[in-house]
Image (cartoon, helix red, strand yellow):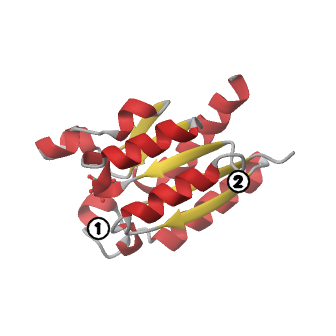
Amino acid sequence: MTRSILILNGPNLNMLGTRQPEVYGPTSLADIEALCVAKAKEMGVTIDFRQSNHEGALIDAIHAARGVHAGIILNAGAYTHTSVALMDAIASVALPAVELHLSNIHAREEFRKTSYISRVVVGQICGFGAAGYPLAMEALISYIGDS
Ligand code: DQA
C-alpha cells in the first residue's frame, strides 16, 4: 500500500511569499506544496497538504489522519507556542509526527523558544526555509520505515 502523509500548516502560512520574506523567505505556500508533491513522487509516497488559520480545523485534520495517514508533518505557526489543544491532538492520534518551522525559532524572540508541539513529536526541523519541507518528509519516512 502507498504510504500517505499529512502535511499540515497553521495560521498565517497562507501569506508566505509576501509575509516577512526576510524571516520566512520568498517562497509561497503553493510553491512549497509543489516542492512536496515532487518530493513525494520521488519517494513513492502520497501527501495531503493543507493549511488552516483555525485551531479547531487543525485539530479536526489531525484526528481525521488516524487510520488514513502514516504520519504527520506539522508547521503549527504561532499555535506552536500557545496550543495545548494541538499538542493533545497529536498525542491522541498516536501517529509519528515531525514539527517543522521555516525560521529558526530558537534564534528569535524568547516566546518562540517554547514549543508545546515538541513534547509529542519524533523531532523538529527548523531554520531551513522552504527546504525544510522535503527534509521533514525524508525524516518522517525514514522514521516510519524503521519503526
Ligand atoms: C513559524 C514560526 C512561528 O513562530 C511563527 O508564528 C509562524 C511561522 C515558522 O515556520 O518559522 O507563523 O512556524
> Which badge, 1 or 2, comes first in the chain's sequence?
1
Q: On the rendered image, what quadrant is the N terminus found in?
A: top right
Q: Residue 69 at what x, y percent from top left?
A: 68, 48
Q: Is residue 61 left or right of residue 14?
A: right
Q: Nearer the viewer, mark 1 or mark 2?
A: 2
Most extreme residue toward the right is 1
Indicate the amino acid at tag 2: Ala
Q: Residue 53 at what x, y percent from top left?
A: 37, 69
Residue sitting at x 37%, y 31%: 119
Relative to residue 42, is residue 141 depicted above or below? above
Which is more toward the observer, 79 or 67? 67
Name the image quarter holding residue 104: top left
User: Which quadrant of the picture is home to ligand 1?
Assistant: bottom left
Q: Please say if the residues under marks 1 and 2 sit with CB atoms less than 8 Å apart.
A: no
Residue sitting at x 35%, y 63%: 25
Q: Secondary structure at mark 2?
A: helix
Q: Residue 40 at what x, y percent from top left?
A: 70, 53
Q: Is mark 1 within 8 Å of ligand 1?
A: no
Q: Secondary structure at mark 1?
A: helix
Residue sitting at x 63%, y 29%: 143
Crowd around label 1: few <14 · some 14–19 · many ≥20 (10 Å) = few
Name the image quarter holding residue 138: top right
Residue sitting at x 54%, y 65%: 50
Indicate the amino acid at tag 1: Pro
Which is more toward the observer, 69 or 126? 69
Which is more toward the observer, 71 or 33? 71
Residue at mark 1: 21
Q: On the rendered image, what quadrant is the C terminus found in?
A: top right
Q: Residue 3 at what x, y percent from top left?
A: 77, 46
Most extreme residue toward the left is 110
Residue at mark 2: 40
Crowd around label 2: few <14 · some 14–19 · many ≥20 (10 Å) = some
